[in-house]
């Protein structure tokens, strides 16, 4: 059995294009998902059942069903509906690209909301009391204490979520998108060289994972100056 | 009741296969996890290195890509060996085997960490006491370690099971006729993808709910006799 190294080298430019697609997908989905997750998490910790119950339902459904099913419902299912086809939404949902972003966004929003809920509930009670004692109004406490504190507490778990969405983004290849996995599958179908291409794709994913993990380590270090040992004097 | 145009039994068949592939994967995955954890805690640097590489690589790769590697790469490997032995014709690994192996491999990587934590959580004195009364390694593991580490490992393993259950849907990509594959077939035949994928989602959700109930019960059972807080 021969290992075609030349094919691997020749495929690197195509896979780099695939990587650009993967990075786009996860960057957009994570940014939009985070924007959605913050209000969801705040609603999730509400005392009113009318507010937290629907959010809980949303989170439960998205965490309890496979991402693949979610993508197919959006890509094949929504396109089938006349109502969607005739409205302006069709401009969005006829593109596999936006279907993938839409699905990944909702999926990561559900997971992130649950992570943020845990973090919000972990914000020390004394800090909120102190803020109230200083006379801060509710919204200011939210903006200055709760949200920033929760972010720092949620960072390690959110890092895991980023890795999970990176891994999940490979499913975009099942709806014709040419992300890393998609490009590799197309070349494998043409050359039937599964080892070379899939191993190369694996290297690309591991490189992305490494970059994400390192960046998060650095972010955690930057955001916790109070936990670092003081620098040596002199 | 929603109209499934006679495709209901097809979905049920698929769901049954989904369940079987998930159970087979978890059984094999637990073995991978235990071996991995033992290797990670061993004194041999080579074993430790191998286990660390295993967990780091598998946890950084998409499950779909791993499945494609095992299915296509594995088929090619088996075929080459087969041809090397003088055999002919095209050989392909069964999707069920490739899928089970991949999911078990992924489950094992995460379970390695869960088991490692659980083993470390059992007080060292108990292990020493077991050896002191003359138990062998295997006997110590079965009588002292396993019943206690179980309690620490169960919540983590429960989460992994829920992830595994959902990941079985990926095997439809390599044409195993489990729930997702059959749903796609039914959706294609009837031109009603929305209804059928929604039905599949409901079935997966039911699996999740039942699993959560069972897990809660077993967690309670695993910590019986333990004084809490």
Image: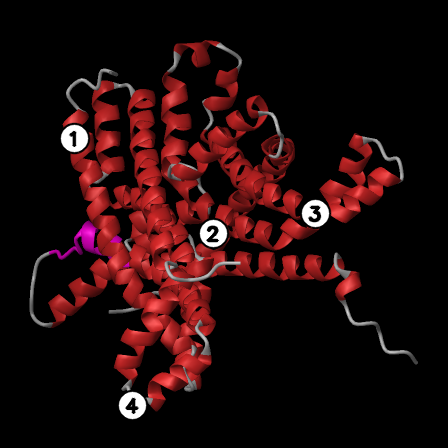
Residue B77 x/y as whole percent: 22, 65
Tell me whether the residue at label 2 lies in contact with that at label 1, contact meaning CB atoms closer than 8 angstroms.
Answer: no
Q: Spatial distance from mark 3 to mark 1, Cα to Cα?
A: 49 Å
First of labels 4, 1 by sequence position: 1
Q: Spatial distance from mark 2 to mark 1, Cα to Cα?
A: 38 Å
The range drawn in magenta is: B90-101
- Which quarter of the rendering shows the C terminus of chain A? bottom right
Q: Mark 1 lies on which chain?
A: B
Residue A82 x/y as whole percent: 40, 10
Mark 4 and mark 2 on one chain: no
Q: Spatial distance from mark 4 to mark 2, Cα to Cα?
A: 59 Å
According to the image, label 1 marks what residue?
Answer: B10
According to the image, label 3 marks what residue?
Answer: A123
Q: Spatial distance from mark 4 to mark 1, Cα to Cα?
A: 56 Å
**Considering the numbered disc 4 on the image, is that residue within a helix, a strand or a loop?**
loop
Q: Which of marks 3 and 2 is in front?
A: 3
According to the image, label 4 marks what residue?
Answer: B134
Q: Spatial distance from mark 3 to mark 2, Cα to Cα?
A: 43 Å
Q: Which of marks 3 and 1 is in front?
A: 3
Tell me whether the residue at label 4 lies in contact with that at label 3, contact meaning CB atoms closer than 8 angstroms.
Answer: no
Q: In this view, does A151 lie above or below A2?
A: above
Q: Spatial distance from mark 4 to mark 3, Cα to Cα?
A: 49 Å
Name the mark on residue A15: 2
């Amino acid at each position: 059995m021969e290992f075609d190294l030349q094919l691997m080298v020749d495929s690197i430019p195509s896979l780099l294009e695939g990587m650009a697609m993967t990075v786009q997908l996860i960057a957009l989905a994570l940014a939009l998902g985070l924007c959605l997750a913050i209000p969801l998490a705040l609603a999730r910790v509400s005392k009113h059942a009318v507010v937290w119950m629907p959010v809980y339902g949303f989170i439960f459904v998205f965490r309890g069903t496979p991402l693949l099913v979610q993508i197919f419902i959006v890509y094949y299912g929504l396109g089938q509906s006349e109502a969607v086809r005739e409205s302006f939404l069709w401009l969005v949902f006829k593109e596999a690209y936006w279907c993938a972003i839409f699905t990944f966004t909702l999926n990561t929003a559900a997971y992130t909301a649950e992570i943020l809920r845990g973090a919000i509930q972990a914000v020390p009670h004394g800090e909120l009391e102190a803020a109230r004692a200083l006379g801060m109004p509710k919204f200011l406490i939210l903006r200055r204490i709760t949200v920033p504190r929760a972010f720092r507490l949620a960072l390690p778990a959110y890092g895991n979520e980023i890795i999970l969405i990176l891994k999940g983004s490979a499913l975009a290849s099942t709806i014709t998108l040419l992300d890393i996995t998609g490009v590799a599958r197309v070349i494998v179908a043409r050359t039937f060289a599964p080892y070379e291409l899939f191993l190369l794709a694996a290297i690309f994913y591991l490189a992305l994972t490494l970059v994400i993990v390192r960046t998060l380590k650095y972010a955690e270090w930057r955001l916790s100056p109070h936990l670092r040992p003081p620098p040596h004097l002199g | 009741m929603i109209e499934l145009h006679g495709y209901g039994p097809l979905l049920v068949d698929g769901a049954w296969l989904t369940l079987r592939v998930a159970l087979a994967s978890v059984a094999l995955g637990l073995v991978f996890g235990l071996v991995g954890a033992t290797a990670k805690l061993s004194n041999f640097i080579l074993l430790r290195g191998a286990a660390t590489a295993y967990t780091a690589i598998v946890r950084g790769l998409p499950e779909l890509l791993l499945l494609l590697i095992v299915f296509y790469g594995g088929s090619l490997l088996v075929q080459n060996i087969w041809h090397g032995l003088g055999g002919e014709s095209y050989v392909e690994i069964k999707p069920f085997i490739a899928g089970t192996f991949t999911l078990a491999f992924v489950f094992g990587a995460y379970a390695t960490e869960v088991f490692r934590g659980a083993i470390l959580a059992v007080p060292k004195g108990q292990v020493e006491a077991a050896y002191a009364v003359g138990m062998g390694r295997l006997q110590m593991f079965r009588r002292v370690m396993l019943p206690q580490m179980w309690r620490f490992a169960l919540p983590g393993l429960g989460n992994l099971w829920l992830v595994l259950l959902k990941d079985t849907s990926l095997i439809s990509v390599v044409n195993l006729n489990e729930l997702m594959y059959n749903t796609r077939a039914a959706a294609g035949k009837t031109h009603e993808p929305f209804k059928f994928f929604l039905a599949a989602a409901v079935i997966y959700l039911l699996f999740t709910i039942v699993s959560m109930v069972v897990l809660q019960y077993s967690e309670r059972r695993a910590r019986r006799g333990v004084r809490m807080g």
